[in-house]
Amino acid sequence: MTVALSLTACGNKTTNSRSGNDSVQTETLNAQRSTLNTPQPMFLYCLSAKSMQVVYWTEYEKPDKKFFDDNDMIEYYEPSLEAWTLQDMARSHAEEYTKVLTADGKWVDIKYVGEQLKDPDGKKIFFGELHSRPAIPSAGLKYALANADDPMAKKAEWQGMNLIVTDSYLETHKLLSMKQLPYREKPKAFPQGVLQQLEKQYGMKTQRSVQGYTLGDRYTYGIVQFKPKNNKVIALEVLTDGDKTYSLPKEGQYDPEDNNSTWNVDDGGEYPVCCLLGAFDGPEGVELYYLHPAPESSTVGRFILKDGKMVEQEYSGYHNMIDEQTPLWKKDLTLMRELYLQDDRDLNKHYTLTKYMPIDIDNDGYDEFWLRAGDDKHGALFTCRNGKVELIGVETEKRHVTFMQSRNGKGYVQIAGSAGGPSIYTQVVAIQKSKVAERFNMLEVEGEITEASLNGRTINKSEAANYLDKTPDKRNPYIYFIDIREE
């Protein structure tokens, strides 16, 4: 199942969705496969089929300097050598990742198209963040469909995190079929024999258990959550293989005053079942690749059976960026200011656009921009996508902006006001896929329509009135402007 990331707004920043301490016996695997011929699968963050990326989770340079904590003078490495080694494996073998696993268990061919390390202004991009808008760049490896017309690709659901592999990996690993079991409604608990075995092993009583997936014809994956004991709470990642049961403990935080258990911010006291993105049987045994979603973070990694134990290799705990403001890049700002001057150089040369507000007029995931001068009367609206900027319209002290609801993939904005004397000028612009799709212009004198056009074609009074009648209702977005910092 391809899973959309949970991006619920929250107040605290959490970069690791999974809590734990030294009392939880979790074995971590070293990322040693970078020296082997078979790179292990990676996680591809997809906002669309045209926005697919292995997002970096740590620094790009190899950590070779030692740092000291000012508080307790503990020597440590930053960033983690293990995290860097795993990421470097992906970078070293980027072109070998040629297949992405779809939601229905099929493979679609992809190709590596380059590495992105800097934003459009030339600044280094911070790692470890998942953005909800494709206009906001992430550091990482960029991929695209090998065949944009692939019928399988057109049917696939791309939103969220997906698994990518190399051909060499598939030569030695068999993809296991996965069946997701009900989770929210009527979840299926593990058999009593499994629960009794785990209760005896950990000395705690079961509060809830959920079977999440059946894998192939032999494995079942899910979770068990114990009741708090001695102000301690533990949940288990569980994998069963016939009559064998394997588990991996995850200690949460327990508040005895509220009788509340927490593993993730705003998790409602329930440890979630991971979303499995792929399961394989290989030379080293079964491998489960997971996404552990939380409101503010998304953790990806794998579970494997090693030496009779269930162990985990965590790739990254990404920070889900929530309610982000799309940056206004310098090159786009330069184009916007020039288009504003070109519209009426004699008038607009007296006003410098010094602040902006991003607003997605057509709800396509890409913001348009409303720029204004310091007097809050003169300004302009622009589309902006993939470096292409287009003027929507200009506001003055006499002509004001009104936003309208979107409809059928189009968003509407009206700029209207006095044209001098008894005349009123009205312009309606429709935006679709971040481009101007329609331009309607109308002049009224003493309430009578005297001129009107649609996309440069003259229309009569009846057509003009009919067009206005069919425009959507007014939209009332929260208006805020961000000062443009000139460097």
Image (tube, rainbow, N blue to C red):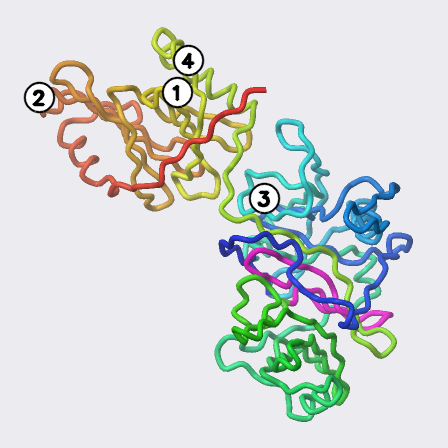
Of residues 154 and 36, the one drawn nearer to the viewer in this rendering:
36
Number of other residues with Cα within 10 Å of mark 2, as a class: few under 14, some 14 to 19, many 20 or more:
few
Specify which label sits upstream in the sequence, 1 or 2.
1
Residue type, mark 2 in image? Glu
Q: Classify mark 4: helix, strand or loop.
A: helix
| Residue 310 image point, x, y percent | 78, 74
Q: Nearer the viewer, residue 24 or 160?
A: 24
**Mark 3 touches mark 4? (CB < 8 Å):** no
Please tell me which of labels 4 and 1 falls first in the chain: 4
> Which mark, by number, is residue 374?
1
Occupied quadrant, residue 436: top left
Give SS at disc 3.
Answer: loop
Q: Which residues are magenta?
A: 276-303
What kind of residue is marked 3?
Answer: Lys
Q: Which residue is mark 2?
A: 446
| Residues at marks 3 and 4, CA–CA distance in whole angstroms | 34 Å
Q: CA gap, disc 4 to disc 1? A: 16 Å
Looking at this rendering, what residue extends furthest in the right direction? Answer: 35
- Give the CA separation, mark 2 to mark 3: 50 Å
Q: Earlier along the polypeptide chain: callout 1 or callout 3?
A: 3
Residue placed farthest to the front in the image? 71
Which residue is found at the position 39% from the left and 27% from the top?
Answer: 381
